[in-house]
Structure formats: C-alpha cells, structure tokens
Amino acid sequence: MPDPDSPDVARLLADELRRHRGDTTLREVALGARTHHSVLWRYEQGLRIPPRDTVARLDALYGAEGELIRLREAAADLRDQARKGGKNHENGDYEDMERRRLIQAAAVGVGLTAMENHEQVRQLLSLDQDDDSRSVEEWESTCEDLLHGLRVRPAAKIQEAIGIELNALLRERQRASQAGRDDLLRIQAALAALYANALGRLGEHEAALRWWRTARRAADASKDQHLAIGIRATEAGNTLYGQRSPKSVLELTRTAHGLARGVPSWGLVYVLCGQARVATVLQRHDEALAALRQAEDLVGGAELPMSSVMPTYWNGGRATEWTSSMVYAGAGDEERSTWASDMVVANNRDYQYRTAARLHTALCTVANGGIKEGLTAATEIIDAAPPGHRTNVVTHTALIVLNAVPREHRTSPAALELCATLGMDV
C-alpha cells in the first residue's frame, strides 16, 4: 500500500504552495500562517498534506481566492482513497482510483495549462475504453510528430505536448510486460531527448541536462547502438549553447566517437558536426574544418545506417549545412559561409536554425573586421525574430557574435545595442 502522504498524492498542492510563495522566505510565510518554517518546507516538498486551518491561512495570505483550499481537499480525498485500497489490476481498483484522480484534477484545474487540463479529460474518457495502449509503431509515429512540432512550433508549447506523452509512456510501461517495457526503452530515449531539446530551447539548462542523462541511459539500456550514438551527438550539439562548457561538450563528442568505433553512420556524422562546432567556439578553426570535411565525406559516401526510432532526427545533410554555416563564418570564409547559410535558410525546417544561420553571416562579418556592421546585423536579426522563436540557440549564437568582437570594442554603441536587445546587463 502506498504511503498516504506520498509525494505522488500531495505533489499538486506542494507545487502550488511553492509557486504562490514565490521569492518570500519560508520564515516570513510561516510567521503569517502561524506554523514553523520547517513544517511549511515539508508541505512544499509534498511530504505531508497540511491541515485545513493552515491551508486556509495560507490561501488568505497569498490571496489565492480559495484555490489552495479546493486543492487541499482534493489531495486529502486522494490520500483517503489510497488508504482504503491499492493498485489491484485484477479487481479493477486501479482503474477506479485512476478515474477518480483524473476527475478531481480536471475539476480542480489548479496549476494546469489549458492543454494539460484537456489532456486530463481525454485520459478520463480513455479509461472507459477497452484499451488505450499503443503499439511500438504508433509510439514511433508519435515521436516523429513531436519532432515535427519541435521544429515548427514555439518551444513552450511543444514542451507541454512532449510532457503529456511522457506521462502516457509511463502509464504504458506500468501496464506492459517486461518484454514490452524493454521494447519501449527506445521510445523513452527518444521522448526524453525531445524533452531535453525543448527545455534547452527555453533556457532551462539544469532540467535539460537531467533529461539528456535520462535519454542516454534509456538509449544504452535499449542496446540500440545507433540510437546511443545519436543521442550523445545531439546532446553535445544542444548543450554547447550555454548548458556546458565547450571542453565538456568536446569530451562528450569524444565519448560518442568512441562508441561509433569508426563505423560510418548518421550518428557519427552528428558527432563530427558537434566536434566542428565546438572547435569553432574555441576558435580552433583548423580542427573545425577537418571535422566538418570528415562529416561531409560520410554524407557523400555510401548509404548510412540510422537509428530505428525517429530516424529523421539524425539523417539527411542538414546537419552539415548548419555546421558549415557556423564553421566557415568563424573562419571568416564569407563565400562559403554565405552559401551554407542560404542553404540552411532555404532547406532547414527548424525555425531556430534558420535564424541562427542568419546570425552566422553576422559572425563572419565580425570575423572579417566589420565589427559595427556585424553587430548591427545581429541586432536586426534578433529584433526580427518573433519572441516565441528566440530560443536559447538563437540568443546564444548572438552571444557568439558578440564574443568574437575584440574586447576593446565590446562597449561600442553597436555592441551595447545588441546587449540591450538580448536583455543583458552591460
């Protein structure tokens, strides 16, 4: 039987208590709520459900207009249900408890976005059907759909959608046999990688790193070597933009390169592209060019094997075009950088890479001595990007442009304008 006050039962209330407190200290709130700060901390961690009178005082203190009181009653009801029964699949208790949980969550609606609230209702309806499970093939199709969404929709929206599918996958794994759970490891790795990617775009660096670790472990456990290489290569490429130091990213690409053992694959192409980009950031342009040429040779050679799940994440020549845009820009090769940037803008479906490729042209201008012109171009490119498209990759690429400027020019009017556009303190 589960712990009646387990974090699973109390987490909705705990999340709302933390959210309402904001930047106010625990001691300050505890004084107003007539409780001890250590006790309040336990409530916020979901370790205990607070008494009604304490929640009533917190609700009044935060001006929550009864929201916390309603949520506390729902959480307490769930706790009481957990005390009365467990997850017994044979007699249907599990389905009944899950139905009650969804009814309450949908009715309360506290802390949920519209999409999440609608998903609670959809799950409730699905429980009245014989089977809401999916085949591995259907899960693979889900991953492709989410990948498409990641490329064309604002990161916050697609992160929400991926999170819903991760919850669905968790329920699927709970119902599946051991063999079925093993089959779903590839899906778990793919969804975790997509979620990490979305978090990275939003600048949620610590959370993104945790999800990349989850993706790596699931890929390794799946025994899909191409997937394990592809996950690490993609992680390296994404975490280069402020989540990890360039040297740490370089080490990650070397680990992935070792897994590949020199065997050509799309994963190895991405590894080499990652090495080329990090070498560019470190201003080791000869290394960058060498890695890029190796990647281009692989793409132009024999047909390459790819991962068995979400293959369009890793195949195709788009990675080399995007990498060429950055590598040649950093080296100051205007002709090749412009050509590669134009290819990315024309062919890449992902909005963030089209915007970042334009920033590469500004980087090339700076590398060739056109400091004011390059900084002005970067500012105009950021200004023109819709707010939902200013992902971490885009803003960090603008920082790469700024960092290419000699120190004595970083307080020039053009540099200060770019900093202001990026919301940076000078």
Image (spheres, rainbow, N blue to C red):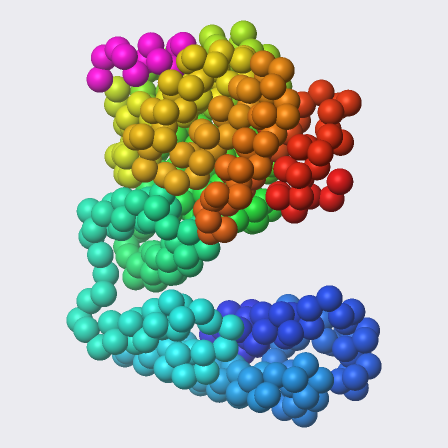
Tell me if residue 239 comes above or below residue 254 in the rendering. Answer: below
Does the magenta run of residues contain 424? no
Tell me if residue 282 comes above or below residue 411 in the rendering. Answer: above
Q: Which residues are magenta?
A: 292-303
Q: Position of residue 99 (x, y in %)?
A: 33, 79
Q: Position of residue 211 (x, y in %)?
A: 50, 46
Q: Position of residue 126 (x, y in %)?
A: 24, 72
Viewer-proximal residue among 340 and 51: 340
Assign the magenta stretch its main secondary structure: helix
Viewer-proximal residue among 312 and 334: 334
Horizontal arrangement in the rendering, residue 293 relative to residue 110 (left or right): left
Horizontal arrangement in the rendering, residue 214 relative to residue 246 (left or right): left
Residue drawn 76% across and 31% down? Answer: 411
Number of marks in the rendered image: 0
Viewer-proximal residue among 194 and 86: 194
Regarding residue 275, the answer to whether it shows in the image is no
Residue drawn 64% across and 22% down? Answer: 371
Does the magenta run of residues contain 301? yes
Tell me if residue 17 comes above or below residue 391 in the rendering. Answer: below
Residue drawn 54% across and 7% down? Answer: 286
Q: Quadrant of residue 418?
A: top right
Regarding residue 130, the answer to whether it shows in the image is yes
